[in-house]
Amino acid sequence: MVIDPYLQILLIIIAVLAGMIILLLAAMVMSRLLVSLNSQKYRLKTQEWEDIYLSYLYGDLSLEEAAGLMEGEKPYWLWKFFAPYLEVLDGHDFEKTKTLCREIGLIHHYQKKLHRGGAAGKAVAARVLGALRCRESVSEMLNLLHSKTPFLVWAAAQGLAKSKETDPFFPTAQALLGNTFFTYEGATEILAGFGENVGPQIVWYLEKEVEQLPEVGVGQNINSSKSIVRKDMVDPVDFRSMMIDLLGFFKYRQALPLLQNLLEKADEETTVHILKAFLNMGEVPANLDLKPYLEHRYWVVRNFSARVWKLTGDRQALPVLEKLLSDQNWWVRFNAAEALGSAGQPGLEILKQKSAGDEQVAAAISSYALSRSEV
Amino acid sequence: MSTWVIILIFYNIFVLFYFISINGFYLLLVLISYRGLQGQRMAERAADRYRPFRSEFYKPLTVIIPAYNEEATIVETAYSALALRYPEFEIIIVNDGSKDHTLGVLEEKFNLEEYARDFSLDISCNTIHSIYRSKDYPRLVVVDKQNGGKSDALNAGINVSQFPLFCNIDSDSLIDADSLLKVVDLFAKDWRIVAAGGTIRAANHCSIEAGNVTGIKLSPKFWVRFQIVEYLRAFLFGRIGWSFIGGLMILSGAFSIYRRKAVVQAGGYKLDTVGEDMELVLRIQRAMKKANREYRVVFISDPVCWTQVPENYRGLQTQRRRWQRGLTESLFGNFEMCLNPQYGATGMISYPFFLFFEFLGPVIEITGYLVFIFSVLSGIINPPFVILFLSAAILLGILLSTSALLMEELYYRSYPRLRDIFILFGFAVLENLFYRQLHAWWRIRGLIDYFFKKRTWGSLERRSFTEPLKPLGK
Amino acid sequence: MSEPEAKKILVAEDDPGLNRLISFKLEKEGYRVLPVFDGKEALKTALEEEISAIVLDIMMPFLEGIQVLKKVRIAKPHLPVIVLSVKSREGDLHQALELGANDYMTKPFQPEKLIEHLQKIMRNN
């Protein structure tokens, strides 16, 4: 029987399609079986390792004995096992754990990955080596900051922050802002991982700013190729703001006098961040006069000043807060009302007056604040 | 040969190529989504699981839940929202003039009291009667307003909320506890993002406790099983693919997150449309373009929103007719984006794709079937050839659905029993032999609705989340 | 004269690895350990069992450490409690101390220091 060549082609296509479908089904079944086998194995292994590791940590097993029992295992599984301990331990116990990881070849494995792996491998390696605080890997991770792939820049930044080394701090900050699409909140979160040990560096940088030497630190092209994603240079005001945010996060109260100095020369954006820092620290410099900021032309400054006011309790500013109840911006009215609500009798008096008054806008926000203070 | 015969033959060929291209394109999307998921997995492996849970690193967010006659499901939804883990957020349930006991049920369960909440009317909306807050759960706010439709309710919610981000959740949806963290993380890592959407999965017959899905089960219902396969193919892997190439046009109204400023700039949700989520996404893109701002609309597959999908023929038909109407309204309303290179992949690829394959698609399909049957019966076309061709097209469709099932197995493994996969495969096969054709018919009726009549949502019999079915009025 | 063998310590920490770490060390020191992994269990065990001290993590599922502390202090005002938390959550620590926690430890930490502090507050009791 002679079959039309077109039909032949079609039959082949059909056979191929049917075959692929069956293949996919088989892949699904295999995948499920493999995964359940693997997870069982993983559970058993980690139970085993827990006993070995804890015995080693508390002196019942020597390093050689423990390493002998744990080496040769899947590096990623080992990493997953050790990760929570590395996160939570400090000092002597951390060092012991790190030594064990080195002895079983984990560090070496990930150093190789960092050097020669694909994007995924490098990213995990940066994570692992950062958690293990491997000083030797810092320079390699610094190189990664110049990568054209924002994903790798992020991974390197995270690893460097975790490593708690202080030298990479500024390059990491610049890279996050210049080589990725990160928002400031996102970048600040990663940089916060460096810990308050970078406080002195930030203070040094801001002191230079106060002395108006803008070329310091910021302003250099990180990467002169086209991969700059936001601007040619990292915006100095934004960078400065991020540094101030970090001081606030670390509650680095030693910087309060510096911040007060900076406040006198600051532009709008910087002012906002300094006020935010005061809020985070829960403290303001002595003799801080908030009135000019409560009456500032930029609503965000007015907003944060109202919030900061709660830390000062300066009675002299109450009339200004009262004026703010009629402010154009909702958040300013809201925070001014909240501030008055926390100001004891005089504040509540003002709110009660305003809530019964003719001015609708002030009345509305005052009633709202009063009802909130009743909670 | 007479001209009629030639036309018929060509039309048959045209329809067959249509099937091959639509299935082929979706198959491409699924393959692309494989790359997209690889990227997500990379990011997960390298991410820090022990990040400090600090509010200054996460923008505060409002969860807006519009509700109309939802007394059966609103409480579970509220619990689900309250269980969300996020440093600073607020929940605003907008009662859009419900005729049933939605407000009453909320008042009772959550100990509501009226309070004087000030807000600014950034987008016009119908009268807000009163605003309540829960004495037991300070994060919960209920807005009672004059009926105005879902868009109007959402706009009211946006007005009352003041946080920079908001998340729109349907009143019959449940969200996993860590969903907000995962989504906002994306916003923090990329300042260009103005809107993001998450995965929708069918919650039917899954076990639910205190607003959380605790046990995933494959629903025994016939119509639900089709939808599960469909959702995996189109709403999960399809969208990951679209998002990867930068052409994402639709976010599910059941779970989507926006930057408030961008939405206000775009004018809020449009009132006289049933496809308000897609419409908004398109309009935001146009607003951003006008303001000369770089923007991204993304899809994240990890946070899951669980929703009750229609379990019977009528409910499903009503829903699909409505979706087709909404699609048509959105496509026609934002036509300047079509084939406009300014809008990148969305304008050059997605828009024409949706116009041809999703809008026009059902017309081509149904007329195609009719012409095909006629041609075979009148002996115009050579049966073996066409039958084989048809088989190839159908097998391609089955291959597409199966690849979606494989991806589901590789990345999520949601359904616990091995035989669930085979059941779903069976439905993937059936889908191409029966459901698809039915679906095309429903969508044609949707088009007829658009061009000739209907303007309302239709009523959907809503199943309560917790079994057994709660009696109404309780 | 207290004999360590008799004393039961409640270790409330949701990370199983960390919980085991602390429990292991305590057992080596001769204590009996009751490990729990969420706030509800922590509260239940604290109220029902005869325990000599609690190691309490602040962030736990179902019921937060602060809530557990509040309720335990009402029933057992003199029970030594040492609170564990992440360094950045200063507010939680202050709150815990005000509610009557005897001491605190921030992560990352050294388990032996934790045990030292624990023994101190148990002695002072």
Image (cartoon, rainbow, N blue to C red):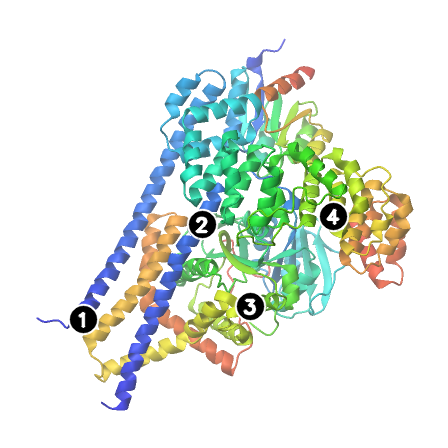
Q: Distance between the residues labelled 1 and 3?
A: 45 Å
Up/down of B336 relative to B178, above or below? below
Look at the numbered discs 1 and 3 and tell me whether their residues touch, using CB distance below 8 Å. Answer: no
Q: Which chain carries label 2?
A: B
Q: Which chain carries label 1?
A: A
Looking at the rendered image, the quarter that the N terminus of chain A falls into is bottom left
Q: Residues within 10 Å of mark 4 (few under 14, many from 20)?
A: many
For the residue marked with disc 2, what is the amino acid? Gly
Judged from the image, the secondary structure of the residue bearing numbered disc 4 is helix
Q: How far apart are marks 3 and 4 (CA)?
A: 36 Å
Q: Distance between the residues labelled 1 and 2?
A: 42 Å
For the residue marked with disc 4, what is the amino acid? Thr
Q: Mark 3 points at which residue?
A: B282
Q: In this view, does B420 lie to the left or right of C99?
A: left
Residue lying at 40% horizontally and 22% vertically, measured from the top left: A67
Q: How crowded is mark 1: few (under 14 residues within 10 Å), some or many (20 or more)?
A: some
In this view, the residue in front, A351 or A75, is A75
Up/down of C10 relative to B5, above or below? above
Would residue B413 be seen by someone viewing this image from the given angle? Answer: no
Labels 3 and 4 in the same subunit: no
Judged from the image, the secondary structure of the residue bearing numbered disc 3 is helix
Q: Is residue A239 left or right of residue A222?
A: right
- Which is in the foreground here, disc 2 or disc 4? 4
Q: Mark 4 lies on which chain?
A: A
Q: Where is residue A311 drawn, in percent x and y? A: 81, 41
- Which is in the foreground here, disc 2 or disc 3? 2
- Which is in the foreground here, disc 3 or disc 4? 4
Q: Mark 4 points at which residue?
A: A270
Q: Name the residue under label 1.
A: A7
Q: Name the residue under label 2.
A: B39
Labels 4 and 1 in the same subunit: yes
